[in-house]
Image (cartoon, helix red, strand yellow):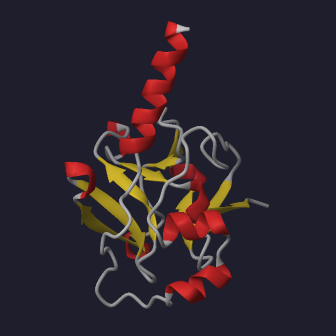
Amino acid sequence: MRKLIIALLITATAATFGCENSAGQNSQPKGAKSKAPAEWKKLLNTNQYHIMVEKGTEAPFHNAYYNNHEKGVYVSAATGDVLFSSDDKFESGTGWPSFTKPVSQGKVAIIEDNSYGMTRLEVVEKSTGLHLGHVFDDGPEDRGGKRYCMNSGALKFVKKQ
């Protein structure tokens, strides 16, 4: 029972601080061409809208791609633009899909996130300003040292043919 309680506390802490962002933070990059929230609501499902527009997060280890090992690319759930490759995905142990880099730095923007009394770096889709996740400096050193911790709900996987 004690181990279960400790495991639940660790999971709750990871969910709160691992990749979550606070709603209400203004993170749209300058020049981003985004739709009104009502338009996104028509294009995205409830989970995608919560993550991308409201800057929510999904539970660790209970999302579509944290344990995906197939070859392919991860595209934006909103635009279909290719954002990440399975070649850059790695097992971070956090319960979210993690990548060492985006396919192109021009596809994402990094914005300071001061929610929850700490400073983190939020990753948004550059063309829309929609929330994808956060980037941290604790990735594999031999692959650049970055961990792009993304929400599966902000992505769609396209399997390599």
Rendered view: 151 above or below 50 = above
Q: Residue placed at 44% from the left, 65% from the top?
A: 55
Residue 99 location (% of width, % of height):
47, 50
Rendered view: 82 above or below 35 = above
The answer to whether residue 118 shows anywhere in this view is no
Residue 59 location (% of width, % of height):
55, 44
Residue 138 location (% of width, % of height):
31, 39
Asked which quadrant contains residue 15, the reply is top left
Looking at this view, is 26 or 89 the one in front?
Answer: 26
Identify the image quadrant of the N terminus.
Answer: top right
Residue 82 location (% of width, % of height):
57, 71
Rendered view: 59 above or below 74 = above
Q: Residue placed at 56% from the left, 50% from the top?
A: 87
Looking at this view, is 136 or 6 the one in front?
Answer: 6
Q: Residue placed at 46% from the left, 69% from the top?
A: 54
Q: Residue placed at 44% from the left, 68% from the top?
A: 131
